Image: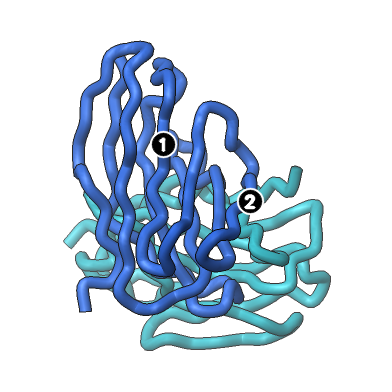
Chain colours: A cyan, B blue
Amino acid sequence: GQQLNQSPQSMFIQEGEDVSMNCTSSSIFNTWLWYKQEPGEGPVLLIALYKAGELTSNGRLTAQFGITRKDSFLNISASIPSDVGIYFCAGYNNNDMRFGAGTRLTVKP
Amino acid sequence: NAGVTQTPKFRILKIGQSMTLQCTQDMNHNYMYWYRQDPGMGLKLIYYSVGAGITDKGEVPNGYNVSRSTTEDFPLRLELAAPSQTSVYFCASSPSGAGGYTFGSGTRLTVV
């Protein structure tokens, strides 16, 4: 099946630092998405990318759709305590969305 | 708007029991999905539906059944609960199936 490899698994950073995480796949996806999940809640969509090479920002978040369509990255600038959570990448083709295993982010004030 | 509502939030089942996880959405979305989330494993698709009366299997459908009699509701049925079905279950919906899903807050199921 289509497997997504997300790294790192976890990050412990100081407030104010920048964060970078990425996702790679052996398969091509038509859409890449990034979600954030907080404890006891479902994932919430942060950014959706629809075109190879696309670079999209949402506030302090920036994500890119890799040129090969097999990878994507998410950057968070100037982290704040409320950035804490699990970040999931997802690749989408034809009613099938595959998720990475997540990056657990901890931000120390 | 309530979005996607899942009930119950928590449930403990004994092996062999059955139950239905409820999911309803009030956004008039055609597409609905059921995922399970296991620790460190991301989410895996169980079943999905592209509209009322239409359902299809996802990546991990064994042990589950679904129905979609209305646009709003997409219940997930476990017939003979097994310990391997201990997980957190998420329902999601989207207007067009193009990837931007709205998720419910999940049902945490434990089978003992």
Seen at 50% across and 38% down, the residue is B65
Quadrant assignment for the C terminus of chain B:
top left
CB-based contact (under 8 Å), mark 1 and mark 2: no
Within 10 angstroms of label 1, few (less than 14), some, or many (20 or more) residues?
Answer: some
The secondary structure type at the circle numbered 1 is: strand
Q: Which chain is mark 1 on? A: B
Q: Does any portion of residue B46 appear in the rendered image?
A: yes
Q: Is residue A35 above or below residue A66?
A: above
In the picture, measured across the screen, residue B64 lies left or right of residue A16, that is right
**Which residue bears the numbered disc 2?**
B56
**Pointer 1 and pointer 2 on the same chain:** yes
The secondary structure type at the circle numbered 2 is: strand
Q: Is residue B73 above or below residue B81?
A: below
In the picture, measured across the screen, residue A86 lies left or right of residue B6, that is right
Seen at 48% across and 44% down, the residue is B66
Q: Quadrant of residue B39?
A: top left
Label whose residue precedes the other's in the sequence (1 or 2) = 2
Q: CA–CA distance between discs 1 and 2?
A: 14 Å
**Which residue bears the numbered disc 1?**
B77
Q: Is residue B62 above or below residue A87?
A: above
Tell me the amino acid under the disc marked 2.
Asp
Q: Is residue A76 above or below residue A51?
A: above
**In this orientation, which residue lies closer to the viewer: B106 or B27?**
B27
Seen at 38% across and 83% down, the residue is A60
| Residue B68 on image: x %, y % | 47, 56
Within 10 angstroms of label 2, few (less than 14), some, or many (20 or more) residues?
Answer: some
Tell me the amino acid under the disc marked 1.
Arg
Seen at 22% across and 48% down, the residue is B7
Quadrant assignment for the N terminus of chain B:
bottom left
| Residue B15 on image: x %, y % | 35, 12
